[in-house]
Image (cartoon, grey):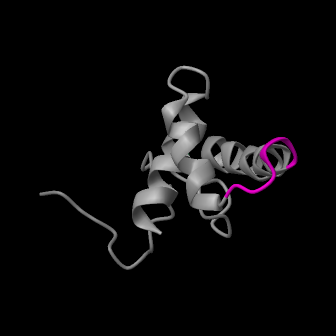
Amino acid sequence: MIKISSKKTLAVCPICKKNKENSQEKYCKNHNAAKKLLKPGYLSWLKAYGSVSWDEFLKRLLDLEGLVGDFIKEIVEYEFYFQ
Ligand SMILES: [Zn+2]
Protein backbone atom coordinates (compact mmCIF):
# COMPACT_ATOMS: atom_id res chain seq x y z
CA MET A 1 0.00 0.00 0.00
CA ILE A 2 1.28 3.40 -0.91
CA LYS A 3 0.53 6.26 1.39
CA ILE A 4 0.15 9.63 -0.19
CA SER A 5 -0.19 12.66 2.00
CA SER A 6 -2.68 14.40 -0.18
CA LYS A 7 -3.80 16.87 2.44
CA LYS A 8 -0.53 18.68 2.31
CA THR A 9 -0.09 20.80 -0.76
CA LEU A 10 3.10 19.63 -2.30
CA ALA A 11 5.28 22.60 -2.90
CA VAL A 12 7.06 21.55 -6.01
CA CYS A 13 8.48 23.51 -8.87
CA PRO A 14 5.97 23.37 -11.77
CA ILE A 15 8.83 22.88 -14.20
CA CYS A 16 11.14 20.28 -12.73
CA LYS A 17 8.76 18.96 -10.03
CA LYS A 18 11.45 19.22 -7.42
CA ASN A 19 10.60 20.39 -3.97
CA LYS A 20 10.71 24.10 -3.54
CA GLU A 21 12.72 25.23 -0.59
CA ASN A 22 10.54 28.26 -0.18
CA SER A 23 6.85 27.64 -0.79
CA GLN A 24 6.28 31.34 -1.29
CA GLU A 25 8.28 31.21 -4.46
CA LYS A 26 6.77 30.02 -7.70
CA TYR A 27 9.73 27.92 -8.72
CA CYS A 28 12.56 25.96 -7.19
CA LYS A 29 15.83 27.63 -6.34
CA ASN A 30 17.40 26.98 -9.74
CA HIS A 31 14.47 28.09 -11.83
CA ASN A 32 13.89 31.06 -9.57
CA ALA A 33 17.46 32.18 -10.09
CA ALA A 34 17.07 31.73 -13.84
CA LYS A 35 13.90 33.76 -13.81
CA LYS A 36 15.62 36.56 -11.99
CA LEU A 37 18.14 36.73 -14.80
CA LEU A 38 15.40 37.24 -17.37
CA LYS A 39 14.37 40.73 -16.33
CA PRO A 40 17.82 42.36 -16.58
CA GLY A 41 18.31 40.44 -19.81
CA TYR A 42 15.13 41.90 -21.20
CA LEU A 43 16.08 45.40 -20.14
CA SER A 44 19.44 45.14 -21.86
CA TRP A 45 17.69 43.94 -25.01
CA LEU A 46 15.40 46.94 -24.83
CA LYS A 47 18.43 49.18 -24.68
CA ALA A 48 20.08 47.40 -27.57
CA TYR A 49 17.09 47.02 -29.89
CA GLY A 50 14.81 49.87 -28.90
CA SER A 51 11.52 48.07 -28.66
CA VAL A 52 11.15 44.40 -28.01
CA SER A 53 7.97 43.01 -26.54
CA TRP A 54 8.25 40.52 -23.71
CA ASP A 55 6.85 37.77 -25.93
CA GLU A 56 9.25 38.65 -28.68
CA PHE A 57 12.10 38.62 -26.20
CA LEU A 58 11.13 35.15 -24.98
CA LYS A 59 10.77 33.92 -28.53
CA ARG A 60 14.19 35.21 -29.44
CA LEU A 61 15.72 33.70 -26.33
CA LEU A 62 14.37 30.31 -27.36
CA ASP A 63 16.00 30.77 -30.73
CA LEU A 64 19.36 31.20 -29.08
CA GLU A 65 19.95 27.49 -28.88
CA GLY A 66 22.87 26.66 -26.69
CA LEU A 67 23.50 30.20 -25.64
CA VAL A 68 21.10 30.27 -22.75
CA GLY A 69 21.33 28.05 -19.74
CA ASP A 70 18.98 25.11 -19.50
CA PHE A 71 17.21 26.58 -16.52
CA ILE A 72 16.57 29.84 -18.32
CA LYS A 73 15.37 28.00 -21.37
CA GLU A 74 12.98 25.93 -19.30
CA ILE A 75 11.65 29.03 -17.61
CA VAL A 76 11.12 30.72 -20.95
CA GLU A 77 9.35 27.70 -22.39
CA TYR A 78 7.19 27.39 -19.32
CA GLU A 79 6.25 31.07 -19.12
CA PHE A 80 5.81 31.39 -22.82
CA TYR A 81 3.51 28.44 -23.29
CA PHE A 82 1.64 28.44 -20.03
CA GLN A 83 1.15 32.06 -19.13
ZN1 LIG B 1 12.56 23.89 -11.00
Q: Is residue 59 above or below residue 73?
A: below
The residue most toward the left is 1
Q: Is residue 82 above or below residue 38?
A: below
The residue most toward the bottom is 7
Q: Kindly tell me whether residue 18 is visible in this rendering.
A: no
Q: Could you tell me residue 11's position as x and y percent?
A: 51, 64
Q: Could you tell me residue 77's position as x and y percent?
A: 46, 48
Q: Could you tell me residue 41's position as x and y percent?
A: 78, 43
Q: Could you tell me residue 69's position as x and y percent?
A: 60, 28
Nearest to the observer: residue 35 or residue 44: 44
The residue under the point 55% across, 28% down is 64
Image side of residue 14 versus residue 54, left or right: left
Q: Quadrant of the rendered structure where residue 16 is?
A: top left
Nearest to the observer: residue 63 or residue 66: 63
Q: Magenta stretch: residue 48 in it?
A: yes
The residue under the point 42% across, 50% down is 17
The residue most toward the top is 66
The residue under the point 58% across, 53% down is 56
Image side of residue 20 versus residue 2, left or right: right
Looking at the image, how many numbered discs can be counted on the residues? 0
Image side of residue 68 versus residue 8, left or right: right
Assign the N terminus to one quadrant of the image.
Answer: bottom left
The residue most toward the front is 50
The residue under the point 24% across, 62% down is 3
Nearest to the observer: residue 72 or residue 19: 72
Q: What range of the chain is rendered magenta?
A: 47-52
Q: Kindly tell me whether residue 23 is visible in this rendering.
A: yes
Q: Magenta stretch: residue 60 in it?
A: no
